[in-house]
Amino acid sequence: MVKVLFVCLGNICRSPVAEAIFNKRIKEAQLVHRFLADSAGTSAYHLGDPPDQRSVSNALGNGVKVSHSARQVVREDFSEFDYILAMDRDNLQHIQLMAQIQEVSHNGIFLIRSFQSNAQGLEVPDPYYGGKHGFQKVFDVLDDCNQRFIEYLLETH
Ligand code: 4NP
């Protein structure tokens, strides 16, 4: 079983949507016995909270049901997950620093957009303080990332 952890700051806007899109695509492709996803945040701001209502309703408008309880990245995640995909550079650095401090080596930590073509180094923008439009932009980016990433997984595993 290949396990994927999507990581953002609060675990209420971006990463729960990434997780939901991934799991929906995997379910539709009848690959649930091979791949699964979860999500977590680098901060403790929203521990136990449901996903942001704006993320939930926007995703639902795109046919994706999002349900999650916010949690923080923990040490065990480095052994549990094969891939840890960060939404932006701040979160990538946070995860890499955590791995370094805890003396774990992990070769599956990436920026999620590195799986898109022509998006090297680009981030998934934080929609939290912006308007409604930002949530659809995030959804579109995550949908494309997941499509590419799943293609990569199928070629690699
Ligand atoms: P997320 O968005 O990292 O995509 O879940 C945010 C959620 C909450 C905050 C920032 C970003 N916050 O500052 O509380």
Image: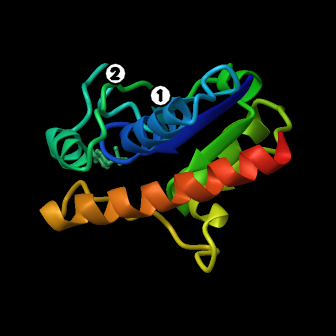
Colour scheme employed for the rendering of this structure: rainbow
Q: Is residue 90 above or below residue 80?
A: below
Disc 2 to disc 1: CB gap under 8 Å: no
| Residue highlighted by disc 2 | 69
Amino acid type at mark 2: Ser
Q: Residue at x 54, y 73 (%)?
A: 122
| Residue highlighted by disc 1 | 72
Mark 2 CB within 8 Å of ligand 1? no
In the visual, does 146 lie left or right of 79?
left
Displayed quadrant of residue 11: top left
Q: Secondary structure at mark 2?
A: loop
Within 10 angstroms of label 1, few (less than 14), some, or many (20 or more) residues? many
Q: List x then y, in percent, for residue 141.
A: 43, 63
Amino acid type at mark 1: Gln
Of residues 77 and 98, the one drawn nearer to the viewer in this rendering? 77
Displayed quadrant of residue 34: top right
Q: Nearer the viewer, mark 2 or mark 1?
A: 2
In the visual, does 91 lie left or right of 63?
right
Mark 2–mark 1 distance (CA, rounded to whole Å)? 10 Å
